[in-house]
Image (cartoon, grey):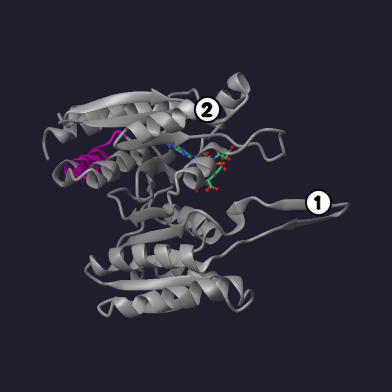
Amino acid sequence: MGYRICLIEGDGIGHEVVPAARAVLEATGLPLEFVEAEAGWETFERRGTSVPEETVEKILSCHATLFGAATSPTRKVPGFFGAIRYLRRRLDLYANVRPAKSRPIPNSRPGVDLVIVRENTEGLYVEQERRYLDVAIADAVISKKASERIGRVALRIAEGRTRKTLHIAHKANVLPLTQGLFLDTVREAAKDFPLVNVQDIIVDNCAMQLVMRPERFDVIVTTNLLGDILSDLTAGLVGGLGLAPSANIGDTTAVFEPVHGSAPDIAGQGIANPTAAILSAAMMLDYLGEKEAARKVERAVDLALEEGPLTPDLGGSATTKAFTEAVIRALGRV
Ligand SMILES: NC(=O)c1ccc[n+]([C@@H]2O[C@H](COP(=O)([O-])OP(=O)(O)OC[C@H]3O[C@@H](n4cnc5c(N)ncnc54)[C@H](O)[C@@H]3O)[C@@H](O)[C@H]2O)c1
Ligand SMILES: O=C(O)CC[C@H](C(=O)O)[C@@H](O)C(=O)O
């Protein structure tokens, strides 16, 4: 039996990096069947909704989904909602797992091998904002249930790694009710994981320590917006957004996507780095139980990064297509 994979390109460079990742997936030789679905800003403009119901149905009919990126305007547009944010909440994809690993390129910091585990359903992402004349208010929701389940995901990941260390990154010193509930709940869950060395860290110090000494971190668990920001920081440590993969995982399905967005500044030029999408596809293979194929794809990416040619974000002049072909050639040698 094969795997049904839902592909959602989205907007901008999503149209370039998802086909690249698909080509690499096809080159693994695994029995994969692809189902295409649409979501994002272009979909909203065409159909009046950024996530048509049939897209949700297609995702649910597949074993896993690979998502590119979707554009969200910074102004309020009536009827619009952010596609990936909607899918995370609609499908209860509560764990956003974002690894950052050193890669064999000059602008990647050596010695980094960490995972950010970002709570993916609440915090400030409940998107409850109100405006009263010149004052605007946003709600941040933290629940014991969501904090406990994301805490347990992070603790299980930490338990399975060599260093077995978990940092809980929080701002409970300023927000003791919301951030404090998150911190206390994860600490409580940690009692069931005696092998994991659990430490608290205030998020601003965590950001500084990540820049100064990233090699000391193993797994970091944090709330939604803090994880959003920290995971772009860790992407920057290892070579940039073009290299950072992620997984949105729930109990019934999972959506894999590069950490980056639609990159309007380079979209349509065929020069986007497909590595983040390809590594997200590797995370998807791992989720599907195809561990060996996942490891091979990751090794092929590292070989291609080592040997080049590199895309412009990494200082080269290769196209998306040329780099993808290099990864596919490398797949034959790993
Ligand atoms: N998951 C998502 O769908 C998602 C994630 C982030 C941002 N966004 C949306 O994307 C749009 C653009 O946001 P942004 O500019 O802040 O972030 P972005 O990630 O799209 O781009 C940030 C910078 O990184 C570069 N970059 C990103 N990915 C790259 C790649 N694969 N190869 C080479 N360079 C790459 C871009 O050229 C840009 O200079 C916004 O509308 C935002 O809402 C969506
Ligand atoms: O632009 C959007 O609608 C979502 C962007 C998205 C987020 O979680 O905020 C992105 O920054 C990410 O880290 O996945």
Q: Is residue 28 left or right of residue 248?
A: left
User: Would you name the residue on which mark 2 appears?
Assistant: 52
Locate the N terminus and report the quarter of the image it occupies.
top left
Of marks 1 and 2, the one in the foreground: 2
* Res 31 quadrant in image: top left
Q: Secondary structure at mark 1?
A: strand
Give the main secondary structure, helix, strand or loop, of the magenta stretch: helix
Which x, y percent locates residue 32? 22, 28
Check residue 301 for magenta coloring.
yes
The image shows residue 206, relative to residue 300, as above or below, that is: below
Q: Position of residue 180 (x, y in %)?
A: 55, 76
Ligand 1 has an atom within 8 Å of the beta carbon of the residue at disc 2: no
| Magenta residues (range) | 294-309
Quarter of the picture containing the C terminus is top left
Secondary structure of the residue carrying tag 2 is loop
Q: Is residue 175 above or below residue 236?
A: below
Q: Which mark is residue 236?
A: none
Residue 327, located in which quarter of the rendered image? Answer: top left
Please give the name of the residue rendered at 64% of the width and 50% of the height, measured from the top-left corner. Answer: 127
The amino acid on which the numbered mark 2 sits, given as a three-letter code, is Pro
Residue 54 image point, x, y percent: 46, 26
Q: Residue at x 42, y 30 (%)?
A: 57
Relative placement, left or right, of 123 versus 252 is right
Residue 120 makes an appearance in the image: yes
In the image, residue 95 sits, relative to residue 329, either above or below, namely: below
- Provide the residue designation for mark 1: 131
Foreground residue among 164 and 244: 164
Spot occupied by residue 197 in the image (x, y as percentages of width and height)? 31, 78
Q: Is residue 266 left or right of residue 37?
A: right
User: In the displayed image of the protein, which residue is found farthest to the top?
Assistant: 46
